[in-house]
Image (cartoon, rainbow, N blue to C red):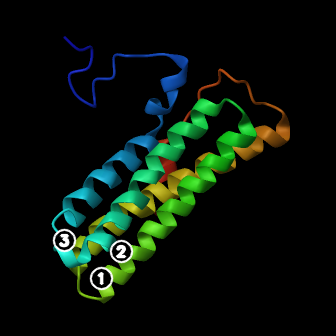
Amino acid sequence: MGEMTDSSNRTRKNKNRGYQKLRVWDYAIEYYVQICKIFQKFPFELKRISSQSIASADSVHRNIAEGYCRRSLREYIQFLYIALGSLGESVSGLHACRESGQISEDVFQNLDNLAYKLENGLIKLIKTLETKREQGDWLDQMIVKEHEADYDPK
């Protein structure tokens, strides 16, 4: 019936879906999944916090995709900065939830490690695109090449 059997088998391909090849987008999806697993279990009286935590994590992958699909380098970079801002909002919430005892230290560390990897990837992608803008090397159909080393927090 469908062309896709799961999220790792992306057989629907076109220029507009190129963001799905970006490692940062994969990391952002994984971050959202992990955030959902934790915050969906929050009790009713914390639903606002839960909802905001899920929404800020959701915003990251959405802004990566929307920026990519805009095809203007200026807009693309702007949306990546919005994604980075949403990630900052999310991480700040994680700190608050840890300090208040709403999430454990282990949960915090796991989510923060993933967020850190994602944050480094976004910063590197933004830097790469800003360099291309300064050098005038941007082509609308370009595919950004990423390297695994760009995401290691070493």
Q: Which quarter of the figure is the N terminus placed in?
A: top left
The secondary structure type at the circle numbered 2 is: helix
* Extreme residue toward the top, this view: 1
Residue sitting at x 47%, y 44% = 62
**Amino acid type, callout 3:** Phe
How many marks can you see? 3
Circle 1 residues within 10 Å: few <14, some 14–19, many ≥20 = some
The correct choice, above or below, for 114 with respect to 64 in the image is below
Q: Which label is found at residue 87? A: none
**Between marks 2 and 3 in the image, the one whose residue lies nearer the viewer:** 3
Decide if residue 60 is on the left or right side of residue 122. left
Residue 145 vertical position relative to residue 134 in the rendered view, above or below: above
Q: Residue type at mark 1: give it.
A: Arg
Give the image quarter of residue 81.
bottom right
Residue corresponding to mark 2: 94
Secondary element type, mark 3: loop
Do residues under tags 1 and 2 come within 8 Å of each other at their CB atoms? yes
| Crowd rating for badge 3 (residues with CA inside 10 Å; few <14, some 14–19, many 20+) | some
Identify the residue under disc 1.
98
Relative to residue 61, is residue 109 depicted above or below? Answer: below
Q: Which label's residue is closer to the chain start, 3 or 1?
A: 3
Mark 1 → mark 2, Cα distance in angstroms: 6 Å
Of residues 138 and 1, the one drawn nearer to the viewer in this rendering? 1
Residue type at mark 2? Leu
Q: Residues within 10 Å of mark 2 (few under 14, many from 20)?
A: many
Q: Which one is in front, 133 or 37? A: 37
Mark closer to the chain start, 2 or 3 = 3
